[in-house]
Amino acid sequence: MKRLSLVFLILVAGGAAVCAAESRPNILLIYADDLGYGDVGCYGAKAVRTPNVDRLAKQGLRFTSAYSSSATCTPSRFSLLTGGYAFRQKGTGILPGDAALIIPPDCVTLPKIMKAAGYTTGAVGKWHLGLGKVNEEVDWNSDIKPGPREVGFDYSFIMAATGDRVPCVFLENQRVVGLDPGDPIQVSYEKPFPGEPTGVSERDVLKLNWSHGHNQAVINGVGRIGYMKGGASARWKDEDLADTFTRKGVEFIERNRDRPFFLYFATHDIHVPRLPHARFVGQTAMGPRGDVIVQFDWAAGQLLEVLERLQLSRDTLVILTSDNGPVVDDGYQDGAVARLGDHRPAGPFRGGKYSIFEGGTRVPMIVRWPGRVKPGVSDALISQVDFAASLAALTGRELRPGEARDSRNVLPALLGESSAGRQHIVEQARGLAVRQGDWKYIEPSPGPKRSKTTHIELGNDPAPQLYDLARDPGERRNLIGENPARAEALAELLSRVRDGGTY
């Protein structure tokens, strides 16, 4: 009798372990930079091959109405990690490389939610959320905090901001990698360091010329935003960025193969400056921009491969998406405009990065979890701001009032168990817009209608705009005059969201 009881207890324990494993999968979030809705094969691209992303889509669920919360990188990342809209907090625009951390260290964040659920957390790649304390100059030659650790990441290997901003060094767990103490780093976003080359003084010998901006410090033969001196041994080589970040991502997965992990893998690709590794040069007819899309696809493939090699694929929820829409000319003369051809980076949508039109925030998103997520296509409304509440629900973490205040639990839609996602989507660029069902309202916003530098349609208009996205996905026909009641209702909804009331 005792033996039968023991067998029963073992079976029950084993079943509980299986249930726990099913409810607590590893989570791999692959976050591309400036990857547009139309930039990968499974979303219609023909001029570039993306076999790994396409395979992920074939094995998982591809979303057609998924959104970043903003048309630029810093606010999108802020919203994704905090579950709160960036427009609620001042100082969440595109940050310089020496900005202080904009996520309050006492804020509940997605990685903290994962840690509370027993996950080991890691951040690899682009950060761009600031480092150090407010009103204190960052000392790049000692421990740099607060940063990813205070936000909730057990491990981090990051660039401080973007590839086109100084400092051009890696940081691993609060320290600059490979720094020679005898060659300390100095950074300034106000004035150049005497005797240091700039993109103006060295323009004739730059290996990648600039079209606008990007003419301050010269690192690796490329003009940047901001000035930097010292740290020669620690400076990255742009052509190796993807390899370095991918290697660190793979190593994180290998180290944590025997326990639940959450990896936020934020690639530099396909952001400028676009300098792919030599093995990707010439892989497309679109020049460097096309080639770094191929490089991004390779990096995603390497992470998927290590999951397969370690037999972790079935126990890992993979989410692949982008921080905002695409931009072709974003400051460097890399031939992206001349060699674009028939490729449509934003797919059928108008605008792109920086734009309040759909091309600014409607992004590719794919979810794969073998055995749990049924492959297919979903039109459910999903916002990246919802990752916090949804993954909290997945892992059994109950959010308290005020935590991740704008995040909504859309886990059934995320896993393909429901076609209903969010009731509405808020989009941020210079101003705000809201989509409810197939209708989108854009609030009046001053400013130019087209960027003089990127040439992207920004969507700014002193008058309100209303579009039926089902019939007019390209937002060409403003129906505000024909549907004043609907526009008024959406404007009221947007006002409630902005004011932080019930919505």
Image (spheres, rainbow, N blue to C red):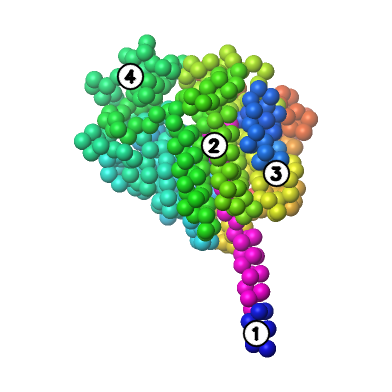
Q: Which residue is mark 2?
A: 299
Badge 4 element: loop
Q: Which mark is residue 502?
A: none
Query: Does the magenta-highlighted stretch encompass residue 426?
Result: no
At label 1, the amino acid type is Arg
Above/below status of 85 relative to 240: below
User: Which residue occupies the foreground of this view, 92 or 396?
Assistant: 396
At label 2, the amino acid type is Ala
User: Which residue occupies the foreground of this view, 77 or 341?
Assistant: 341
At label 3, the amino acid type is Gln
Q: Which mark is residue 3?
A: 1
Spatial separation of the CA atoms under disc 1 and disc 3:
43 Å
Who comes first in sequence, dot 4 or dot 3? 3
Please report the bounds of the magenta region as a residue range.
9-35
Q: Position of residue 377 (x, y in %)?
A: 74, 41
User: Which residue occupies the foreground of this view, 2 or 445?
Assistant: 2
Asked if residue 485 lies left or right of residue 431, the reply is right
Badge 2 element: helix
Residues at circles 1 and 4 in contact by the CB criterion of under 8 Å: no
Which quadrant of the figure has residue 462? Answer: top right
Q: Which residue is mark 3?
A: 59
Q: Which residue is mark 4?
A: 198
Who comes first in sequence, dot 2 or dot 3? 3
Q: Position of residue 149 (x, y in %)?
A: 40, 51
Spatial separation of the CA atoms under disc 4 and disc 2:
32 Å
Who comes first in sequence, dot 1 or dot 3? 1
Asked if residue 166 lies left or right of residue 375, the reply is left
Residue at 39% from the left image edge and 16% from the top image edge: 206
